[in-house]
Amino acid sequence: MTAAAMTPTTTAPGRSSSRHLLALRGLPAKDLRSLLASARDAADTPPVVPGGLTIATLFFEDSTRTRTSFTLAAQRCGLHCVDLSAVTSSVNKGETLIDTALTVEAMGVQALIVRARQSGAAALIAQRVRIPVLNAGDGRHEHPTQGLLDAMTLAKAFDRLDTFDFRGVHVAIVGDIVSSRVARSAIAAFTTLGARVTCVGPASMAPASLASLGVEVSPRLDAVVDQADAVMMLRIQFERHAAGEPGKAPTLASVREYRAFYALTTERAARMKDHAIVLHPGPMNRGIEIDAEVADAARSRVLAQVANGVPVRMAALAWCLGRV
Amino acid sequence: MSTLLIRGGRVIDPASSTDATLDLAIRDDRIEAIGKGLSSARVDRVIDAAGKLVVPGLIDPHVHLREPGHEHKETIASGTQAAVVGGFTSVCCMPNTAPALDAPELIRFVYDAAARTGACRVFPVAAATKGRKGEELAEIELLAQAGAVAISDDGDCIPTAGVMARVFGAVARTGLVFMQHCQDPTLTRGASMHAGEISVRLGLTGWPREAEEIIIERDVRLARASGCRYHVQHISSAGSVEIVRKARAAGARITAEASPHHLILTHEACEHYNTSAKVNPPLREASDRDAIRAGVADGTITVLATDHAPHADFEKSLPFEEAPMGLLGLESALPLYAEALVHTGLIGWPRLIAMLTLEPARLCGLDAKGLGVLRAGGIADVTILDPDAAWTLDAGALKSRSRNTPFAGRSLRGRATATIVGGVVRHAL
């Protein structure tokens, strides 16, 4: 397995014009813009994909919204889509993960949409199959279509649909950045397109080492909330951070301490710039990282994010499967 | 009776400070003579060693032979085949087998299996605690009596100061060295690579340098109190090198070993979730690699050890965080040591040979068994090296049962052309 075979956009060997979508980091701005432009136009003009193809969603980890969004996107592109999320319960070893992917490929599908709990899992499968692999979330690494739909939401909110140039836009990403594949993909897309990004969170979730991703790191939401044009709140992943799990030290002392410094409360949201928007990848913990009033306020783009997911995934499928 | 003459090589014997073009005659399992113009009359076999180095058989004090319990990765037979191809005539095998080498019967099993199937000498290192769990002491004095050459829970660190102090006390009685795998487990839970820019980007939990350094600092104090000899395995961070340097300057009985991969690679080798570069302790940054090389150059690090750690393809094909740690060492070690240390001008061949023979022999008490030296009348463990041989590592041609090396396809310079164990030629190109 060569290094080249693992790069994010490598051509999948099965079809000359097909390729994987494994990560947004490393993807050049022109590719991001081309994907986003294709997604922008998808509502009126579905992207052209080779006819009669069948793709499979191969989900080794629970997800309803991402899988449904991909399924709808596939249907709207005229693709057949089979769902293999039932593997969740029985598969947790990597070799089985590869075997499962090879088995599904052998049945004759033309692309795999992969979700797994291990960082690098989509790249691992992409090394072994001859069809395009779309990463639908791999551990704490990336969730590229989520990053693209976040970029699309920003572009719509700040009128950048012609250029997808985010210079002058300041985005705060708040919460558990270190464990978040959503944050990694968003950071890659936003910074590549020119945005300024500030990560905010407790030391265990937003360590200074994040600066190597090309972002600023701030210890206090209060210092950033009135500076940002967009505030992206991440879900607290209690399953990772709460106390009581054997062998794992809790990294969160309490919800009240977290809320005191890092939640987007009604009071903090009142200090945001007039035009500033609120993002959240969902599912939200209302009343914990985000107050219900904020989640439902006019500045919230949470449902717009979900809506943008379908055309973004149509564009991603077309990009990976290549043109006829 | 068999006789062998190695003619015209550059004979390097660090113990006697020999470095000259000489002949070396072997009769049965002993070196008969070392000198100029030895006669080849009535010799069974003559090896022309012109342009080559003739040195004591190399000793690797840190390998994993996986037997008993993990024979799908390696066996004493396959691992010692790999050893002799790499120029090694003695290896010290670590106790993280299944069961762990924590009882004298198991030490005897290793000696018996090696005598039956081994291509080179094998010396077992015994576990310090029962089951290598870091809790109850193993029968350290019985293990020493059965022939263990060192004590270690390698693969795991003795986590608490309380148990460590008791282990040091018991090991000090035996005169053996305690070898520590320096890793504070509370700082490395779930960690799979160096904590740095790349782990952040890949979404992998990082293994910080401090987890190694604070264990060495703790152990230096505890070992001093007990009088136990203490050895740092596979040193990985610049800070650790500095701690060892200061402790040695202060007179502590502390040694450290460097591994080929830590002398050559950095965490960049883990890019693209390359599991063949997943190793414990992890590959770190260029500044750490350079500090380890500098530690060799100034004598802070005196021992070289491969930490040869075979794993099957299906295991290394797991996602990065689930794949086991470790990589092969024995068959590629010599040219990698030379690349990092000799070709860079940091040390010469005589010092490199000392670090591969005399120093590990002293560490594990093998000098008292007559190993690690070339002398007339002594044991005929001899390695012949071509320091300039250019070759490419072909993973498919390895003698090891496993293939997990990040060096496959690498252009190398220097290799063993003959390995003689007890007068028997076990490897010859």
Image (cartoon, rainbow, N blue to C red):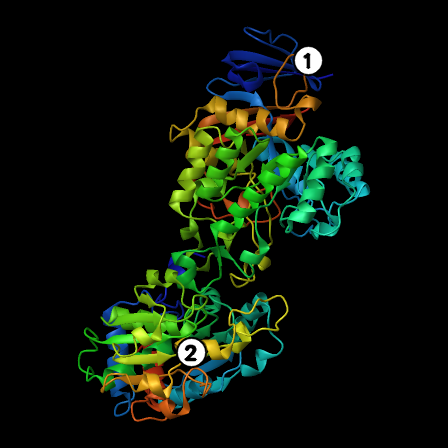
Q: Residue B352 carries which label?
A: none
Q: Above or below — where is A193 with respect to A78?
A: above
Residue A243: which quarter of the image? Answer: bottom right
User: What chain does badge 1 belong to?
Assistant: B
Q: What element carries label 2?
A: helix
Of residues B166 and A37, which is closer to you in this image? B166
Q: Above or below — where is A2 with respect to A169?
A: above
What residue appears at the point 68 percent right and 13 percent down from the top-left corner?
A: B377
Which quadrant: the C terminus of chain B?
top right
What residue appears at the point 30 percent right and 66 percent down from the top-left corner?
A: A216
What residue appears at the point 38 percent right and 28 percent down from the top-left corner?
A: B345
Q: Name the residue under label 1.
A: B377
Which quadrant: the N terminus of chain B?
top right
Q: Above or below — where is B393 with respect to A73?
A: above
Q: Residue A260 carries which label?
A: 2
Residue A284 horizontal/vertical position (percent): 44, 86
